[in-house]
Image: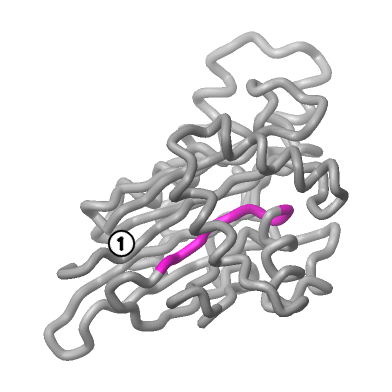
Amino acid sequence: MRSQGYWLQKCGNTPDEYEDAFAADPAARRFAVADGATESGFAARWAQLLVQQFVETPACHPDHWAEGLPAIQQRWSHDVRGHPLPWYAETQFEQGAFATFLGLGFQRSAAQGLRWSAVAVGDACLFQTRAGELLRAFPVVRSEDFGTSPSLVGSRSPVETVQSQRAVRASGTARASDRFWLMTDALAAWFLTEHEAGRKPGDQLAFLVAETANNEAFAASIDALRDAQRLRNDDVTLLAVQVEGGD
């Protein structure tokens, strides 16, 4: 498998204010994106821990992903407490950090070939395309379904609550040359809007990642979409995954 990751902070923010995160391990066939909730404190670190934990535990099936939350919740608390906090940050620390999350894993079997499984909390999205055609959208399937209050996983959320009430799951099969696009909500809303308009956003992204060898060119494309008011101003993350021939 092959993957490429791209990102850009909100227009008007500096790169160190970027609060999304992504991680990939093509050898282990694990990929993840997360979107830290700006209104919560220390959300960028929480998003980083979420994606790292997912890709670094390939033995854990995505269905059981939430079982690993207590360990990274403790890590988040330790990391935040490792630095002196101003008085106003104490309340943020007590309330915890929040993020949306999407994790994708692949498994191969002699009977079923290559299968994928995904878990999501909130509106970070996965799109599977084949020859430019959209095969699957998860967990959001219509652009109008994006709202202002997505489900979130928190640094203090009980595992049982996340597992039974917030996490949703999907699975399917994959073929050589299939593409999987993992992205946070602003770009996902653009993707679905383009699809609903009869265009092929998968082809647009495939051209973009094929033509760009660096994040700066991706950022320029995102800025152009923002200037044209086709993309909401928010942190943007794209993790492009391709199933290569012979895998």
User: Does 177 lie within the magenta span?
Assistant: no
| Position of residue 178 measured from the top left corner of the image (x, y, whole percent) | 38, 72
Residue in the image at 73% along x and 43% along y: 37
Point out the residue furthest to the left here: 110
Q: From where the camera sits, is residue 228 visible?
A: yes
Figure quadrant of residue 23: top left
Left or right for 244, reference 104 = left
Task: Please provide percent x and percent y for residue 243.
Answer: 30, 66
**Residue at left offset 24%, top offset 60%:** 59
* Dominant SS type (magenta): strand
Answer with left or right where residue 174 lies relative to residue 224.
left
Q: Is residue 131 above or below residue 230?
A: below
Q: Tell me where residue 242 sits by quadrant.
A: bottom left
The one of 236 and 161 positioned closer to us in this rendering: 236
What residue sits 30% from the left and 48% below the top? 25
Q: Say which quadrant the C terminus sits in.
A: bottom left
What segment is highlighted magenta in the picture? 179-186
Q: Position of residue 124 (x, y in %)?
A: 62, 59
The answer to whether residue 43 is seen in the rendering is no
Horizontal side of 178 relative to 100 (left or right) equals left
10 Å crowding of disc 1: few (<14), some (14-19), many (20+): some
* Residue placed most toward the observer, 80 or 30: 30
Is residue 181 a member of the stretch shown in magenta? yes
Q: Which residue is mark 1?
A: 60
- The residue closer to the viewer here, 228 or 108, is 228
Instruction: Locate the N terminus and report the quarter of the image it occupies.
Output: bottom left
Where in the figure is residue 99, as x and y percent of width and height? 65, 48
Task: Say if 35 sits above or below 181 in the image.
Answer: above
Q: Amino acid at mark 1?
A: Cys
